Image (spheres, rainbow, N blue to C red):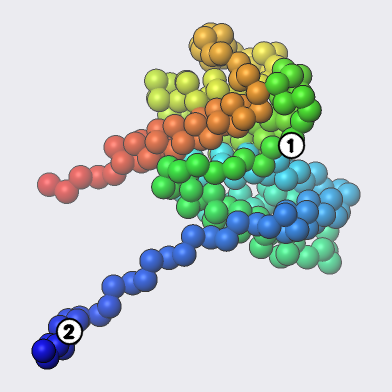
Amino acid sequence: MTRSAPPRRRGPAPPAAKAPPAPLSERELATLQELLDAVPAALEPLDVSALDGFLCGVLVQPGRIAPARWLAHVADVDARPAPPGWNAAPLHALVQRRHAELEAAIGARRWFDPWVFEVEPADDADALRTAVLPWVAGIATAFELFPGTMQLAPETTLEPLALLYQHLDAEDLEDADELLAEIETIEPPADLTEAVEQLVRAVLLLADAGAADAESARPRRP
């Protein structure tokens, strides 16, 4: 039996599927923290957990934030210029790797592992707050610097913001009566696993809200 030749492909070959960004290894994560610790003393960098929350806050915005804008806040939350002679490139390279990893996960609405600290016992309320508070502070910082998410319709953001801000002190939520009321309806996480699940759920819900807003603002062709 003679096999016929396979049909020739017409036109250019389809682009190969883009490989997902490689996650940072434990060693690279430790290097990232070392680089943050080595930022010149005049500046105030985020730690790795706050940085992770900050990147998520950047990524769920209804409009894309240019890298030059958000990278300026990594080494110093107020984006003050670095002193001459300090090389931020190694730090920025690792941060952009994590940004790409999170962007791929959030864009596909799939699970990711937030960088939160392990605590013992994992079901103690104070320990849970200690674990997730830096991460939540990081995402809250992003929302302060880039307020697009906070300007979305409350009916799309109230639940996810409550899932996040339940870990903050009520005194820090000034003029946020509606948000505080929503927080009162939430069952606090029973352990660290549930707390992390709530963080991821909140991020994906906010990404949905931002995407829906961006789509509604897009001009329609007649």
Q: Position of residue 163 (x, y in %)?
A: 55, 23
Q: Position of residue 211 (x, y in %)?
A: 38, 40
User: Dot 2 surroundings within 10 Å: few (below 14), some, or many (20 or more)?
Assistant: few
The three-letter amino acid code for the residue at tag 1 is Phe
N-terminal label among 1 and 2: 2
Q: Position of residue 203 (x, y in %)?
A: 51, 35
Q: Residue at x 44, y 32 (%)?
A: 205
Q: Which residue is mark 2?
A: 6
Q: Residue furthest right?
A: 41
Q: Nearer the viewer, residue 60 or 44?
A: 60
Q: Residue at x 76, y 43 (%)?
A: 47
Q: Residue at x 65, y 31 (%)?
A: 136
- Residue 155 in sight here: yes
Q: Residue furthest front?
A: 1
Horizontally, is 168 left or right of 205 in the view? right
Q: Nearer the viewer, residue 81 or 10?
A: 10
Mark number displayed over residue 117: 1
The three-letter amino acid code for the residue at tag 2 is Pro
